[in-house]
Image: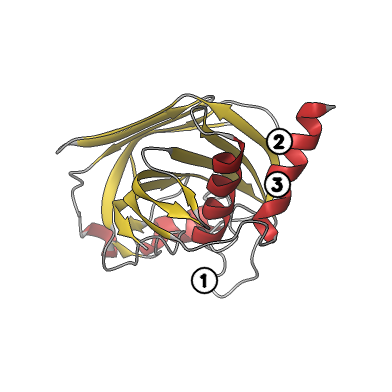
Amino acid sequence: MKRMIVLAALVGISGSPLLAGGSSVRGSYVEARTAEVFTGGCMMNSEAGTAGKEAILAWKIDQGSYNGVSLNGLSVVAAVAGSSNLGTVEMGGDRPSIHSRVFVDQRANPAQRMALVAMANEYSNGLVGTIVNVTPTAINYTENDQQVQVSAGEVALDVNKHVTHDPSCGAQLWFKPLTQTISADDATLGMTDLNLFEGAGLGVKWSDHFKRSAFFGTFSR
């Protein structure tokens, strides 16, 4: 019962201003979809109706606070699954129904966990959608000149920073990042070597490899 009450509180604050205070956060962000974001028109049209319904979004806060709660050194990861391609709105369609699992840094105290969930919801423009579970867990977010790697519970993400922008078949950038954390101008396209969610609660699991489906960058808000 206690766990259910805590979960309800964590989920509830994503839509209500229960926390008070200013927000100033900087850190790193990475995302990967289950569809190419840089590809040819034929591939994009093929995937538009059958793929791209899932994504992983991850934030690592270097320094700052959200709604007055310090988040220095903490991370939050969201695995999201929609009823249709998450880029439907960019293609002129209606926004899909979305459910998510949110993984919060196990080092965070209760107030920080609530702030991390609220931050992820706001910075994703509400893409986090209906949260079915909030899981405190160890989050490993590492980055070097070659890769960005994230692991959190049943989530694993490995993004190669050096993607080949192959212009064959009319390849172009079709989508923008799923979050307002970084703009399209500030985001860098990456090659997703691994995009994995093998948990419960979303009605789907996925394991995606070697797609030009990731964005990464630093943010300051």
**Mark 2, secondary structure of its residue:** loop
Question: In the image, residue 207 lies at what x, y percent?
Answer: 48, 30
Mark sitting on residue 203? 2
Amino acid identity at mark 1: Met
Quadrant where the N terminus sits is top right
Residue at which label 3 appears: 11
**Residue at 66% across, 62% down:** 17
- Residue 132: quarter of image: top right
Q: Earlier in the sequence, mark 1 or mark 2?
A: 1
Q: CA distance from mark 1 to mark 2?
A: 25 Å
Q: Residue 147: in sight, yes or no?
A: yes
Residue at the extreme bottom of the image, as rendered: 92
Question: In the image, residue 28 lies at what x, y percent?
Answer: 32, 48
- Above or below residue 180? Residue 120 is above
Quadrant where the C terminus sits is bottom left
Foreground disc of the pair 3, 1: 3
Residue at the extreme right of the image, as rendered: 1
Amino acid identity at mark 3: Val
Check disc 2: other Cα within 10 Å, few if <14, some if 14-19, many if 20+: few
- Above or below residue 106? Residue 11 is below
**Mark 3, secondary structure of its residue:** helix
The answer to whether the residues at label 1 and label 2 have Cβ atoms under 8 Å apart is no
Q: Is residue 146 left or right of residue 4?
A: left
Q: Is residue 158 left or right of residue 51?
A: left
Q: CA distance from mark 3 to mark 2?
A: 19 Å
Q: CA distance from mark 3 to mark 1?
A: 29 Å
Q: Earlier in the sequence, mark 3 or mark 1?
A: 3
Foreground disc of the pair 1, 2: 2
Residue at the extreme left of the image, as rendered: 145
Mark sitting on residue 160? none
**Mark 1, secondary structure of its residue:** loop
Residue at which label 1 appears: 91
